[in-house]
């Protein structure tokens, strides 16, 4: 009888940790902070970790779950970052990079009826990379972008509303607001400063919300082989992601980072080569887009993001969990 009691006790044990971290499984995220970073892949974190004597652990390494997604859809084996991010946000594989994409339902369209508001903070996106490009698609483009709160870290267009991170800002849906410190090449503010200021205001709009931070400036620096600038941008992203991770201890937060158009950079073999790596980029090889992208996750439903899966499945992994009231989808058709 004693043995039966012991077996019974062990059989009822519940796993409350993941990746050696305290973790509750199956929780509904009511607040989601999602970073989409173009160009980033795991080994590039070495630019921050080994830039000085010794090792510096980064916030990118402080996650509950790490996954990888396949960077292909129905038409291409290697996708652009904007195609990948759109696939992740819509759960669809047939991204065409034209106005037909505006007919898809993005994640904010699904969750709005459940009381979630969505904000976009976009940094360094070209016209083709920006979601604002859907404005040229007529009525269906306006529907695609409807109800969004939208901030842009690019040079302001004439007559556009602007904001500054140090000033009190009034936020409204369906309005494009530009960081007025930004010029043709750079911004006077950091992403961290803008993220903290924008999120502090946005989270007061509603208890349930999603904010997506989209960065394309890092990929631009990589493409120019300006590794010093790339490291500065990556450091800014790392601090911003670390700021978001502070919320992960709250049970209703999901902190997510996904990448697109990930590039392989051949890093130096020896410490003495790092100075030349940034200064001159001599002998550094950067290969074309990888076949996989990186996913980092912490907080509510982080367990859904371990493993390997398609880019289009990021969408359903946010919305899928144990039967709860609110944020579940039964069936997602990737071809519609």
Image (tube, rainbow, N blue to C red):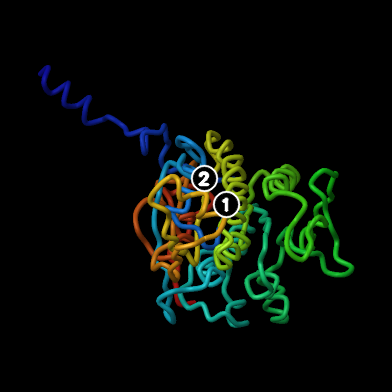
Res. 88 visible in picture: yes
On screen, residue 80 above or below 209: below
Residue that numbered label 2 is attached to? 48
Distance of label 1 from label 2 (alpha carbons): 7 Å
Residue that numbered label 1 is attached to? 231
Instruction: Count residues near mark 2 (Cα–Cα under 10 Å), then give few for <14, some for 14-19, many for 20+.
Output: some
What's the residue at 52%, 60% (across, down)? 281
Q: Quadrant of the N terminus?
A: top left
Q: Is residue 254 left or right of residue 133?
A: left
**Image position, residue 22 (x, y; %):** 41, 32
* Numbered circle sitting on residue 44: none
Q: Are marks 1 and 2 in contact (CB under 8 Å)?
A: yes
**Image position, residue 248 (x, y; %):** 53, 38
Tell me the element at label 1.
helix
| Residue furthest top in the image | 2
Which numbered disc, 1 or 2, marks the residue that appears first in the sequence? 2
Res. 36 visible in picture: no
Tell me the element at label 2.
helix
**Image position, residue 81 (x, y; %):** 53, 68
Q: Quadrant of residue 104?
A: bottom right
Q: Quadrant of residue 186?
A: bottom right
What's the residue at 50%, 40% (across, down)? 58
**Image position, residue 245 (x, y; %):** 55, 40
Q: Is residue 97 left or right of residue 161?
A: left
On screen, residue 10 above or below 78: above
């Amino acid at each position: 009888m004693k043995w039966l009691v012991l077996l019974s006790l062990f059989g009822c044990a519940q796993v409350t940790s993941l990746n050696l971290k305290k973790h509750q499984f199956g929780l509904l995220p009511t607040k989601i902070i999602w970073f989409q970073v173009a160009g980033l892949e795991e080994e590039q974190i070495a630019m921050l970790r080994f830039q000085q004597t010794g090792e510096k652990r980064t916030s990118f390494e402080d996650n509950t779950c790490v996954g990888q997604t396949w960077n292909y859809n129905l038409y291409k084996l290697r996708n652009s970052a904007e195609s990948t991010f759109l696939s992740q946000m819509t759960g669809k594989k047939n991204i065409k990079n034209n106005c037909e994409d505006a007919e898809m339902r993005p994640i904010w369209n699904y969750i709005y009826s459940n009381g979630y508001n969505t904000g976009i903070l976009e940094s360094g996106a070209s016209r083709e990379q920006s979601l604002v490009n859907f404005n040229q698609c007529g009525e269906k483009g306006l529907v695609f972008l409807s109800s969004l709160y939208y901030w842009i870290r690019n040079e302001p267009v004439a007559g556009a509303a602007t904001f500054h991170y140090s000033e009190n800002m009034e936020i409204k849906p369906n309005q494009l607001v530009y960081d007025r410190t930004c010029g043709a090449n750079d911004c006077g503010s950091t992403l961290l400063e803008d993220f903290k200021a924008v999120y502090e205001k946005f989270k007061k709009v509603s208890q349930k919300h999603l904010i997506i931070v989209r960065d394309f400036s890092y990929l631009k620096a990589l493409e120019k082989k300006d590794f010093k600038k790339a490291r500065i941008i990556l450091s800014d992203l790392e601090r911003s992601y670390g700021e978001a991770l502070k919320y992960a201890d709250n049970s209703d937060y999901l902190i997510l980072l996904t990448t697109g158009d990930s590039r392989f950079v051949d890093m130096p073999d020896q410490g003495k080569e790092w100075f030349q790596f940034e200064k001159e980029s001599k002998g550094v090889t950067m290969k074309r887009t990888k076949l996989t992208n990186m996913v980092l996750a912490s907080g509510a439903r982080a367990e859904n993001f371990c493993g390997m899966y398609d880019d289009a499945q990021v969408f359903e992994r946010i919305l899928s969990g144990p039967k709860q009231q609110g944020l579940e989808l039964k069936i997602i058709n990737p071809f519609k």
